[in-house]
């Protein structure tokens, strides 16, 4: 059985070079750290492009060591939304072309999740249509917000309609999470901010009616849905007593299975609880490779869960992801 990691980040070398050479003219502060890695900064967003995020041969060796057959590669911080529409579109095209090239080099091991210039939805639609024709593109990757705009903004609806039409699932990931200014210490931006921002994105899609307007569009939540699973009951209670939620056609918890979730909980019992809450067919193996907060052996995480049966294990390790990404 093929093991598929749906949460793995990568920067194409050519994409980093484009950012390095043209970023300064587009408002980015570009430098190099003592190790020679390119650094990036704009207000609220910083990134360092380490070789572990760029070098494909080392990535394949890491996959082999972890017994992972396929990585679904995606962009992460800083995304492309900070840029002007024109430069953001160029960055998105360069990134997606890099994904296609990586897939052609290793068609059995690497597929891509396209990035879109969401700051200009009309350009995002055009790039989604172009990227869908590239080899190896199997979905779209978006942040949990677009420069502080939540995902239920009506301006984003044409992008969702396009992805639904093209059959491209949308994978989400936090970038510059809510409350970041209060979480500068202790890596709290990641430890607390990322799971919280994921729940805000899910709430926006549910409460904002996006899931109802696009019933065939699939969304994948990172970090096991963040705080969404434990908040579902609270949201349901709010639905019964708060006028702000009276527009919902049904309780928020009824939307839980409209999402897919990765396995990144860092706690086996929490992962089992998620599987029981949403069903094994809605849980996909993920690692967050190659971040220091990642699972280094995501297959082991799933295989050691004694409370699930073989069919559930097979679904999580790759069967459900294979169907979602249309790899057959």
Image: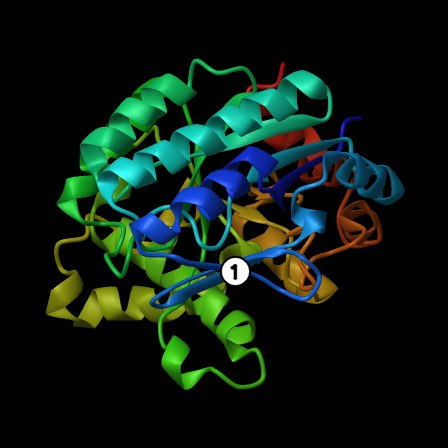
User: Residue 325's spot in the image, x, y percent?
Assistant: 55, 26
Residue at the (32%, 55%) spot, across then down:
145
> Which residue is at the front of the view, 270 or 45?
45
Residue at the (46%, 71%) spot, across then down:
193
Q: Is 328 above or below relative to 318?
A: above
Mark 1, residue position = 31
> Which residue is at the front of the view, 162 or 203?
162
User: Residue 4's spot in the image, x, y percent?
Assistant: 69, 34
User: Residue 248's spot in the image, x, y percent?
Assistant: 19, 52
Q: Is 111 above or below relative to 236?
A: above
What is the residue that sits farthest to the right in this orientation? 65
Q: Secondary structure at mark 1?
A: strand
- In the rendered view, does 171 fall on the left or right side of 160? right
Observer able to see residue 42: yes
User: Residue 70's spot in the image, x, y percent?
Assistant: 71, 31
> Which residue is at the front of the view, 168 or 39?
39
> Which residue is at the front of the view, 297 or 13?
13
Residue at the (15%, 42%) spot, across then down:
155
| Crowding near the residue tagged with mark 1, few <14, some 14–19, many ≥20 C-alpha atoms within 10 Å | some
Residue 198, picture quadrant: bottom left
Observer able to see residue 324: no
């Amino acid at each position: 059985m093929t093991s598929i990691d749906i949460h793995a980040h990568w920067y194409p070398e050519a994409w980093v070079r484009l950012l390095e050479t043209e970023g300064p003219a587009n408002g980015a502060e570009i430098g190099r750290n003592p190790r020679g890695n390119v650094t990036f900064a704009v207000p609220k967003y910083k990134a360092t492009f380490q070789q572990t995020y760029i070098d494909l041969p080392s990535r394949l060796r890491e996959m082999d060591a972890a017994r992972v057959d396929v990585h679904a590669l995606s962009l992460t911080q800083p995304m492309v939304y900070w840029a002007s529409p024109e430069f953001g579109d160029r960055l998105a095209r360069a990134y997606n072309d890099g994904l296609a090239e990586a897939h052609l080099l290793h068609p059995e091991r690497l597929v891509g999740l396209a990035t879109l210039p969401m700051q200009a939805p009309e350009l995002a639609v055009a790039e989604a249509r172009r990227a869908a024709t590239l080899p190896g593109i199997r979905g779209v990757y978006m942040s949990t917000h677009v420069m502080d705009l939540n995902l239920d903004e009506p301006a984003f609806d044409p992008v969702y309609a396009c992805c639904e039409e093209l059959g491209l699932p949308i994978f989400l990931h936090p970038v510059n999470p809510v409350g970041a200014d209060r979480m500068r210490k202790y890596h709290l931006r990641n430890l607390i901010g990322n799971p919280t921002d994921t729940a805000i994105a899910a709430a926006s899609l549910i409460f904002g009616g996006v899931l109802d307007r696009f019933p065939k569009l699939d969304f994948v939540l990172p970090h096991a849905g963040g705080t969404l699973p434990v908040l579902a009951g609270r949201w349901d209670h709010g639905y019964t007593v708060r006028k702000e939620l009276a527009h919902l056609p049904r309780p928020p918890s009824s939307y839980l299975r409209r999402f897919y979730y990765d396995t990144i909980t860092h706690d086996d019992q929490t992962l089992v609880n998620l599987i029981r809450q949403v069903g094994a067919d809605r849980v996909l193996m993920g690692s967050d490779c190659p971040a220091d907060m990642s699972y280094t052996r995501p297959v082991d995480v799933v295989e050691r869960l004694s409370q699930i049966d073989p069919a559930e294990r097979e679904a999580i390790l790759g069967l459900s992801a294979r169907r979602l990404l249309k790899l057959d």
